[in-house]
Image (tube, grey):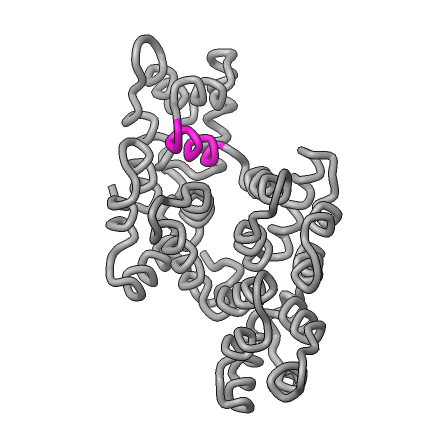
Amino acid sequence: MSYPGYPPYQQTSPTVVPADPFNPCEDAEILRKAMKGFGTDEKAIINVLARRTNEQRLEIAVQFKTLYGKDLISDLKSELTGNFENLVVAMMTPLPQFYAQELHDAISGLGTDETVLIDVLCTLSNAEIRSITEAYHNIYYQNLESDLKGDTGGHFKRLMVSLCTAGRDESMMTNPHEAAADAEALFSAGEDRFGTDESTFNMILCQRNQAQLRLIFDEYERLAGNDIEDAIKSEFSGDIEDGLLAVVRSIKNQAAYFAKCLHKSVENLGTNDRDLIRLVVTRSEIDMGEIKGEYAAKYGESLADAIEGDCSGDYKKCLLALIGES
């Protein structure tokens, strides 16, 4: 299956694929037994849920309620704790709703978690962003764009609003002459002048289709003698630099971009479990196979080894199952 962020001819390798055969009633029964009585059979929960797609997990939840008159997520939350509970609840949440909750948590309260905003809005397709915007409104009765405007500022706010609009050309049609003109415009807006015309970067990076942007990046390097990433690093700083770099990197190589995000979540003292959970849950059904390859190539250890060294218990076992390593 090909996905946004990859050329249409490139197949991706998910590590969670639809179970076949699949019997949601049987799965509901296994989960009920795993949580009934004294103690919890965490292994059985992992064996079922980590080997079903998000859509199949939602079907299991419907059958669980039909058979037992109980809410599966509520039962899981009452039986599980800590990061393992957070991971399983994320797995059981419809993806647009999960992303909407992540964005809401990132911008509500004191401070903003810009990493979440960047990882979500700078990498997803128009259709995905529209479904998240709709889910956000349904859950919080708020407009995602308005909330982003209220919580971000300056050029980063403009970037977030542009991406939230979900208006990128997705035709994948390319035009070498226009690519050369856009590369010239980016060079003139940045490295070739005193000061930076940020709006030109915003316009081109948020509107052009991904195939065209790859051409533009090649043209830019030919024209300027250095990579577009170098230009962004020298012309921007802070959140807007991080956001523009995320757009560029995810368009160049989406698997490498997410490998970098995963490494960031486990590299320092203490794990950023929230980012780790979001990345593993959302990418496992899309391109985790490619991400694992990029991770090993760039960091000299497997993603599984990184998780082994940073996580523990049933949380670790479930993460490894989701990335196809158990």
Which residue is drawn at the image coordinates 55% and 39% (left, top)?
Answer: 98
Q: Is residue 178 above or below residue 54?
A: below
Q: Is residue 59 visible?
A: yes
Q: Is residue 60 left or right of residue 128?
A: left
Q: Please state the horizontal and vertical placement of residue 189, each as a whole percent of the image.
A: 67, 82
Which residue is drawn at the image coordinates 42% and 61% (left, top)?
Answer: 255
Q: Main secondary structure of the magenta part?
A: helix
Q: Nearer the viewer, residue 209 or 82?
A: 82
Q: Nearer the viewer, residue 14 or 18?
A: 14
Q: Is residue 224 above or below residue 288?
A: below
Q: Is residue 88 magenta?
A: yes
Q: Please state the horizontal and vertical placement of residue 95, each as a whole percent of the image.
A: 54, 41
Q: Please state the horizontal and vertical placement of residue 97, each as a whole percent of the image.
A: 59, 38
Q: Quadrant of the C terminus?
A: top left
Q: Which residues are magenta?
A: 82-92
Q: Quadrant of the N terminus?
A: bottom left
Q: Is residue 210 above or below residue 106?
A: below
The quadrant holding residue 83 is top left
Q: Is residue 180 visible?
A: no
Q: Residue furthest top?
A: 37
Which residue is drawn at the image coordinates 27% and 32% (left, top)?
Answer: 313
Q: Is residue 31 above or below residue 313?
A: above
Q: Is residue 227 magenta?
A: no
- Count of numbered badges drawn on the protein: 0
Q: Is residue 192 left or right of residue 9?
A: right
The quadrant holding residue 289 is bottom left
Q: Please state the horizontal and vertical placement of residue 113, each as a whole percent of the image.
A: 56, 48
Which residue is drawn at the image coordinates 34% and 15% (left, top)?
Answer: 33
